[in-house]
């Protein structure tokens, strides 16, 4: 089993119950999550040693974040306390034709306001196999753009593989800003979650027409030519029939080859937040334990599909449960 | 924006949670609603000045009705208090193959027991663009049959357009009673929600076979020949796959032409009560702001589709949200 | 209307709410049920006199079992109190691709620990038309294997028809043990719920290939040749698309003929526990009131389909409601 | 154990959760109850044979009443179905200084609208030890005044003891109407629940000043002189500190002697609806099993005190639990 | 009835259910409130015309604020939309010995960030009897200090009485800052909510020893000498036995005389947030309708006591309900 | 900070909501806890390194136990998986005069069925300051009596202080069995939670009359004479007014002196399960950080008082929160 560090913001999500708009809700469900924390929890569930580094305020909300992570045995030694507030967002759950909608209230958070890397990086990266971070972090501030680069450099120096999930959010920065930053960061990256839209709009790769496999392979190949250091690309493709029904496919590019999972029919969707993180963690798990590529993408997509069936951001399944799900297939009662 | 008066009964709905029969329910959800109130709330959400006229008892239940309407800025100056009780009904929510079922307990309500028009009608109809009322009101009593006619006459005299939703309920009166009353009322009507069954069973129009568009156009045309004063007919057609999955189409007849919305696949259905009212309000909104006919029926059907995704009778969407839903399509996350 | 005795274990089921894993659940839903109790409640709902015989501890949990059964007018005179505990199981509800999963905690229950037939059997079986029991009971212990045989003999002697639901559970005994026991019990049985897998793996009938009807007819015919005393075989076939969507067909073999219900599309599934018991009770009802065979299998499958739409093990529908459901079809609102 | 008939109206109670006003409640708790039904359930819990006679509509609400009573093994053979509706009331739970408040919606119920005694009275009263009825029933209508008298006469003729709970409600009839009716009914009564206010305002007994025991004894004695047929008077006295804290004392007049229970400090009050019925049932149980007078009033008051600690109208305690509560005292954990 | 303007921040409160710490809460109750909004709602409930002026973001949370106020017929014409976010706070409800605790997350809100008075003040204050504002508003920023002063000047000029609730919060500004600001503002104030601690620590009045009445009178008199323009002082005094039990007394200083309400024993406390606002609104109501001073303080304290018995910030009682509560006394059932 | 090992059984508690009997509960709250686990969690909250040793089944329920403990950073390396089941108990919450009641369903659990010490004891006790265990463990079986003795011997040998909570449960073993076992175990104990009843009924110390302090001192002194190795005795005394209101005092005997906390008035009681464990953990914390004796008993009793205000077995307070509670006193709002 490997040792993994994930670093990023973790937020409080306040969500409505299905069938109620935010405006009519007298109670809200409270979940704690963030891309890197979610990846960390999945990997801890699979038996890896995981450290999550971030910063939360010294309040009951910060304390709740600690307890949330510890519950899954994620190491919180590098989870700092201090700063003004915990980033928050409101999720009005979608259903059927009505899409979910999100209100962000994350500005000014303890993590976003950081101006220096307050961790002992030598200590943080010691003996670490993979360092995982996402494109949301450099999007938070100018400081974080520089600090993200510094983190990657230090991690690299310490011998970590760098895993990076582009995860572009138009509400946080422009495509231009993102593109420029990516060009600085991607030379340090070993494993990269990126999709067609990232290739076209952030990295400036010309659009290409073809079938699913041809297109995805094309973009992966182009990106790899731009950043030959990147050994692995991966992504999910989601066919949205409605907010309650999606088709999900996972794709992986490894050793110059394209791999694709089966199609998962996901209906009803209980909660899709964190499904991408579950996929990323599945890929990293496959890399850590050196599964074959096809097995890796199958495992990761299965983990992502399972995530859709439970409330909350984080994937509450062991690797045995994911494997069993792959073996048994869909929806049979187990008794 | 226009000024609209809607008038009718408003009731307390007590409903079970999905998956529980009434007989096994230890708690019931309380919603306040009625066709005309629901239309009023939708129109208020779209920015129109709306007055709702009705009568509720002088109890906490009556007070709850006031607060429910005021929340959406519906004007309650013509909402009277007094009389014996608030009409009530129990809704056992359906799911899958099991249909919803309703127990009415509406007899003897403060509204149904009214024997004279207690409002100052000149004041009520002053500067009003549309007066909206439904076929449920004349079905409540002999008195209400006469009073409905009187209301239409007075509204007409005051210069209002009359909007009428036939909304035939076999539990309240016979087809014969309804047919006779309709023949008295429809000559005053400008905009009419009516369907094929109304045409055949209430107005005695001979049945005709054809495809969907041919049939609907035929009945609309026939009805218009009977009541040339009616400028607009509209209706929804619902293809019921199960209590949890319906297809919904809206149709509109305006200036001798037939318009039809796209098909909405509505699954799962959260709560279909009030979906017809959401459609009617959408049509009236289109008329008030002089949208093109196709835009009107698209808007109205989209509003109705959205209504199915939320709990409660009334449509909690602004016109911007409905328009955005039409533009973006189905179920994408908005963040 | 007939008089029926059902006998077996009744347990407390503790289940999660849809979308939550057991490990993340702060509250659990409590339901009481067991195959024979569920059959008894359905038959009582249809107007038959039903006695349920079992044993529960002398605690509030035992008391809750009494009250649960009495609510449906099941006679509890032969429900004994005493012994160590109430059998329990935990159900993590499935949804979409994720199957439900069960944790049994039923060992050592008051019923399972019984070592003698503590009832006055002459009294129990007096004037009884049908005695219903399932294959779970002999699976509980060596004692229960003998006691089941004894019960059947005594019931037979008292003039009862014997109804037996094979209901094989691999967690309770081996196929070999089950097969040997069945060979002792089935010669006393008149009505038998059994499927293809029972035929092959428990009774050693050679596998056969054909279409659905050919296969099912073949196994029924083979079983009837082995046990010519059995007049009626019946079973449901479930096509599992996901934990939320199943197709359900009921089959019946009576007077050497195969009958099959329509296909029910069951989506969403609210709670499938007890759906087989609802089917069995429907068949027994058909036999008790001497419905035609096709009507019987239609009724039973409809009852089973309805069961999927409600929470809890027991079917909360009257025979009029089931008949009305068959007549009206799927999902129309009743108001 | 005795055989008891109770007869009266049973209603649906819709109540808020503590700390919410009716006007702000999105869900309401549903309980079924009525004085005579509550007394019947308590007596059934104590092991007596109890028949409850009433009339409920032929709807799911009526069905729920049946199942509610059957759960406690109350015999529902004389519970008729039919008529327009189930009487309903809304209870806004009180707390602290804020009193509970009630909205009645009981007019026009299936029971209140009865115009003839639809039961076979000879069958109803056969072998019955006690017939229990309350002053609410004759308050419902002119018809019910006559029918109550007739019931008492027939019950008397059949050899029953007549138990009557005056239970005066000013919202249903005037003191004058009640007084006149009582004078007709009380000559048939054997056991009577009546208090000081009944004596003064309904029966015209002059007010008297003294300590608690002197006053209560005086009124009981005066009433007994007026109606020497009445052998037993009983009542509770409630010292209301707040809606959450009451002191409760039970009093009993038997064989010309006054008995009084200890004082129960009831805080917090979970639900006081049905506490008087629990007391009445306790007294009747004492009479049925011939407890000593002091034991009877202690038992009845303890039962009433326990009722305050649970949600719902009916007392969910066995006689062993009440006795144990008397023996052990207050609030110790039992493990 | 008067016309009143209240102006201030309104926030989203997210609170735990009693008996759960924030850290263990999977759901939170959502309430909208703020001192000035709460005062406005109470006054609207009492029949006054009330305008609430503030600024909320243009999101579903802002929309919820509108609907919350409109429900009580508070006029929202001067409720602006725009700016970054809605102020939020988390309330961990206290119980027994454990105090409630609050986490503020209000910095950077749309209201706090205002830098100019965006309302048309002439329009806002036209025909207004009372303008109510609190000391929280000038505590929000330097800008708000100046803008508060400007508001008071303009309101004064327009002929309004100025009502001011000092409401000092040590987390928002220092005593020194508050004291200096108060000295600028109080010369414009007519009605002032202020207590002993305000007098000593903010206004520098020397401490004095005496009984309750002597002390309070002393400080009121001293403050009036400093600001002879202030005609009315008022305050509540709370004797905290525990988080679940308080004694509450209201005091009023009017025309040089001290008035005091009865003592309210408030136990259990459902929710004390907004109890001070309910008191202030009661006082303003007394002034608007010219109640006698003793009646005013009794009414205001009763309203405040009632507020403690319900969930949410705002007082959901009509003036008739408050008067009836004063008349009837504590906790009797009303039926 | 110290290193502590606690060892014992951990169970699933299923409890009703206040005001509902078990028999009427459709849902139950799930909490995981046990005396030694609860002590461990408190100590981890206070910053100590805590290992909890036990055995749970390899099911989702066992997994939930792991996650529950990890949440509070209790080390689960010595938490074994395997065996038949998780011990369970049902708690019907008491309120007011009605006591709570418990149904145990703990027999045959994975922990109780252990027949050998499956841990590496040298590893378990390495560098451990305190080993804490309770009298429930030797009560579980003959094997556990021997294994408890062996654990104490090994811990002693490894240099641990032995902490023992007598915690006598009459449902698990007789006084005679307990007494004999205690005489074997207590010679190894350093810190002992024991009360007057333990002294008299288990250790055979003659009863003595005196005031509270005299009595408690007498028994502590006598026990210390019997087991001079025991340096510290401690206990809580609970004055039960009702299930909702208790007075709580903590007592401590250290260096031949008696210390007593202030009296805590605990009303309402949210959940008293685990309050004794919170007290024990408070004492152990005082010993570990060498607080003065009076400070220790004050801290421990405050922690126990706080525990009563929250749902669940384990004390969710940091040492700073307990200290602050002691400093600030009761029930003031903190904002």
Image (cartoon, coloured by chain):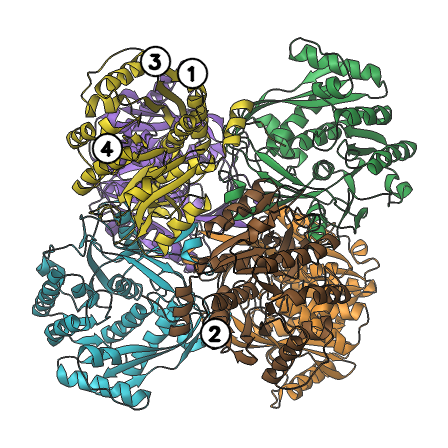
Chain colours: A orange, B cyan, C brown, D yellow, E purple, F green
Q: Measuring 71% from the left and 50% from the top, which residue is drawn there?
A: C107
Residue E49 x/y as whole percent: 23, 46
Q: Please state the chain letter of the residue tagged with numbered disc 3 in the rendered image.
A: D
Asked if residue C52 lies left or right of residue E317, the reply is right
The answer to the question of whether label 4 and label 3 lie on touching residues, with beta carbons closer than 8 A, is no
Which residue corresponds to mark 3? D213
- Distance, label 1 to label 3, CA atoms, is 51 Å
Which residue corresponds to mark 2? C298
Instruction: For mark 2, give the secondary structure.
Output: helix
Q: Which is more toward the observer, B163 or D47?
A: D47
For the question of whether residue B99 can be seen, the reply is: yes
Above or below: residue C311 compared with residue A63: below
- Foreground mark, 4 or 3? 3
Which residue corresponds to mark 1? E208
Instruction: For mark 1, give the secondary structure.
Output: loop
User: Callout 4: 10 Å neighbours few (<14), some, many (20+)?
Assistant: some
């Amino acid at each position: 089993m490997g040792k993994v560090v994930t670093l990023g913001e973790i937020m409080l999500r306040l969500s409505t119950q299905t069938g109620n708009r935010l405006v009519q809700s007298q109670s809200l469900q409270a979940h704690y999550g963030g891309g890197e924390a979610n990846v960390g929890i999945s990997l801890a569930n699979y038996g890896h040693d995981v450290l999550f580094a971030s910063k939360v305020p010294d309040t009951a909300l910060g304390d709740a974040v600690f307890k949330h992570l510890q519950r899954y045995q994620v190491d919180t030694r590098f989870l700092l306390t201090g700063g003004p507030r915990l980033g928050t967002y409101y999720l009005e759950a979608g259903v059927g034709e009505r899409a979910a909608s999100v209100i962000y209230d994350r500005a000014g958070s303890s993590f976003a306001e950081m101006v220096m890397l307050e961790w002992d990086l030598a200590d943080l990266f010691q003996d670490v196999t993979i360092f995982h971070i996402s494109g949301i972090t450099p999007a938070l501030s100018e400081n974080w753009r520089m600090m993200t680069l510094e983190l990657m450099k230090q991690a690299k120096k310490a011998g970590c593989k760098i895993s990076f999930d582009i995860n572009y959010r138009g509400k946080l920065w422009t495509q231009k800003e993102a593109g420029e930053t990516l060009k600085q960061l991607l030379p340090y990256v070993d494993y990269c979650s990126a999709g067609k839209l990232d290739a076209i709009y952030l990295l400036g790769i010309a659009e290409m027409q073809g079938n699913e496999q041809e297109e995805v392979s094309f973009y992966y190949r182009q990106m790899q030519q731009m950043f030959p250091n990147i050994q692995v690309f991966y992504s999910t493709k989601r066919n949205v029939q409605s907010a309650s029904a999606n088709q999900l496919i996972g794709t992986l590019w490894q050793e110059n080859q394209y791999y694709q999972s089966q199609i998962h029919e996901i209906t009803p969707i209980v909660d899709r937040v964190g499904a991408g993180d579950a996929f990323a963690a599945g890929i990293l798990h496959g890399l850590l334990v050196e599964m074959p590529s096809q097995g890796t993408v199958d495992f990761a997509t299965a983990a992502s599909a399972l995530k859709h069936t439970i409330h909350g951001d984080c994937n509450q399944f062991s690797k045995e449960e994911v494997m069993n799900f792959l073996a048994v297939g869909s929806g049979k009662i187990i008794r």
